Amino acid sequence: GAVVSQHPSWVICKSGTSVKIECRSLDFQATTMFWYRQFPKQSLMLMATSNEGSKATYEQGVEKDKFLINHASLTLSTLTVTSAHPEDSSFYICSASSGTGINEQFFGPGTRLTVL
Amino acid sequence: GDSVTQMEGPVTLSEEAFLTINCTYTATGYPSLFWYVQYPGEGLQLLLKATKADDKGSNKGFEATYRKETTSFHLEKGSVQVSDSAVYFCALKVGAQKLVFGQGTRLTINP
């Protein structure tokens, strides 16, 4: 089946620093990638949708200057949390779609970010 | 707006018990409905789906029927196993690709 990886699986950083999270589709080309945020015991919240080679589309309420998304190739998207603060601590999950067939999304295992 | 409500967990059952996880939704138009499962340390996986009213999705012994009249998509399994322990998410699809998730239900099956 289609596999999506994320790196790192967990990261701890100091307040004010920036953190980059990678999302890779390992065995298919992902024309569209999605970034979600999940708070403890809560649902996944879509942050943004990115198509390869174009700017990401952010959901309402998501700061695009704080959460920088780059989808430079058909197998890689990155999420950079800039000037991170403790309230940015969360579980970040990416998914990828090949854009063919039923457009099924394949999910990565997630990255836990803790900002001290 | 569009939303999904799942029964609150955690749910703990004994092996071979009958499972029901309730899911109801609110949506404009006619959404597609999904159940995803997340095993410990892994990403979400599509468990089953239904794209129109009265459709029944099934996989690995799990079933869910798209009930338009009650706006529900309850997940059922007749006899659960320890390996079914996971977090289950109900979701609907609005528009081209946007998924809206419920809050997830943690299921634990004891031997």
Image (spheres, rainbow, N blue to C red):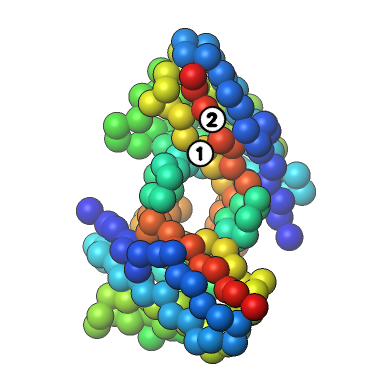
**Residue B63 showing in the rendered view:** no
Q: Where is residue B37 drawn, in percent x and y?
A: 56, 63
Q: Chain of mark 1?
A: A
Binning the other alpha carbons within 10 Å of mark 1 as few (below 14), some (14 to 19) or many (20 upward) gives some
Left or right: where B98 falls relative to B29: right
Instruction: Please provide percent x and percent y for residue A22.
Output: 64, 31
Give above or below for B46 relative to A82.
Answer: below
Which quarter of the picture shows residue B111?
bottom right
- B96 horizontally vs A105: left or right: left
Which residue is disc 2 drawn over? A113
CA distance separating discs 2 and 1: 6 Å
Residue topped by disc 1: A91
Q: Is residue B1 visible?
A: yes
Question: For the point 65% across and 36% down, which residue is it?
Answer: A9
Q: Residue at x 29, y 79 (%)?
A: B68
- Amino acid on which the number 1 mark rests in the picture: Phe
Neighbours of disc 2 within 10 Å: few (<14), some (14-19), many (20+): many
**A49 up-or-down from B53: above or below:** above
Q: Secondary structure at mark 2?
A: strand
